[in-house]
Amino acid sequence: MAIPAIVFIVSALILAKSADYFTDAAAKIGRVLGAPPFIIGVTVVALGTSLPELVSSIVAVTSGASEIVAGNIIGANIANIFFILGIIVILGRKVKIDYDIISVDLPFLLGSALLLTFAVWDGKFTWTEGALFLVGIVIYLAYTVYAEKNPKDTRIEKQIKKGRKKKLEAQTALKFFGGGIGIYIGATSLVGSVVQLGEVLDIGTGIIAMTAVALGTTLPELFVSIVAVRKGNPEIAIGNILGSNIFNSLGIIGVASLFGSIAVPASVLMFGIPMLLAGTFLFIFITEDREITAWEGWLLLVFYVFFLGKTLGIM
């Protein structure tokens, strides 16, 4: 267990530093392009931090272990809402959201979770379903571009006009790409170490996917979100979580299914799916007033501890 544990620690450190570079650069690039902070989080940052889920899912399908994919994606979405959102809200004490997420973003979040539920309920996910899911993610990306060009909030419009006056520096571009590569390398090695630790402890594949692998692949979201909150960009953190869940539910499993049919373990269906839906509804409920308090953050963490306890058979 010594070597996987050391790899885990080193990978976490790489993730933390890479997340710092990536978030700072993404925020600057977004401002230069004239995008509000939430849009930056829900697109650029969310795509970057979802790379571990994408890579691990493709590897799992091509290596004949497709049952890891659904568990990883559903477990990652659960971790994003209960664990990561809980942590960043507690650190930020109170997170306010200026961007209007009620009109389209929250319905897309709920729709993606429901569509994923219906698609995997028969125990498998095919490439035809994946193709349809990819159409869904294209529609969502098209909406974010439209929203950026047609802001409804005057405060958002002022942010866009102010940001467009700035120029993109070469150092910022290097930090962005270097940070993204660092996140990918750190997350990939971290997932490998987590899986090895799970095998040593003799934990089933479906359970490993929903807990250890999912938690490992969501660490980029955690580090990026924490850095964003500490630097005064809470909307990047919220957008990152919301965007990552939509990308996971529609885009990641959609791309992975193009490499082969995906099997869905019974453990994922019986407990993972209900927890995902519960988390999605709770996320919508606590963000509809555009403000999340630390008390709500603690409640989310209680839910995640409950999820881990039940999944691992501790409770």
Image: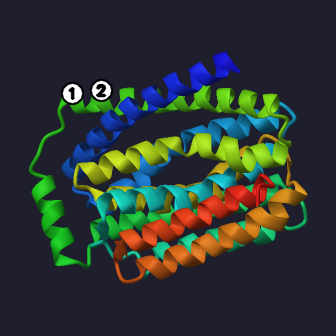
x and y, in percent, of residue 40 in the image: 34, 54
x and y, in percent, of residue 166 in the image: 11, 46
Which residue has dot 1 on it? 170
**Classed neighbour count for the residue bearing mark 1: other residues with Cα under 10 Å, few (<14), some (14–19), many (≥20):** few
Q: Is residue 206 left or right of residue 116?
A: right
**Disc 2, disc 1: CB below 8 Å?**
yes
x and y, in percent, of residue 66 in the image: 83, 43
Q: Is residue 190 left or right of residue 16?
A: right
x and y, in percent, of residue 60 in the image: 77, 36
Closer to us: 228 or 83: 83
Residue positioned 37% across, 73% down in the render: 292
Q: Image height check: is 209 above or below 309?
A: above
Residue positioned 71% across, 21% down in the render: 1
Residue projecting furthest to the front: 315
Q: Is residue 25 visible?
A: yes
Label disc, if present, on residue 93 of the rendered structure: none
Mark 2 to mark 1 CA distance (whole Å): 6 Å
Which residue has dot 2 on it? 174
Check disc 1 and report its element: helix, strand or loop.
Answer: helix
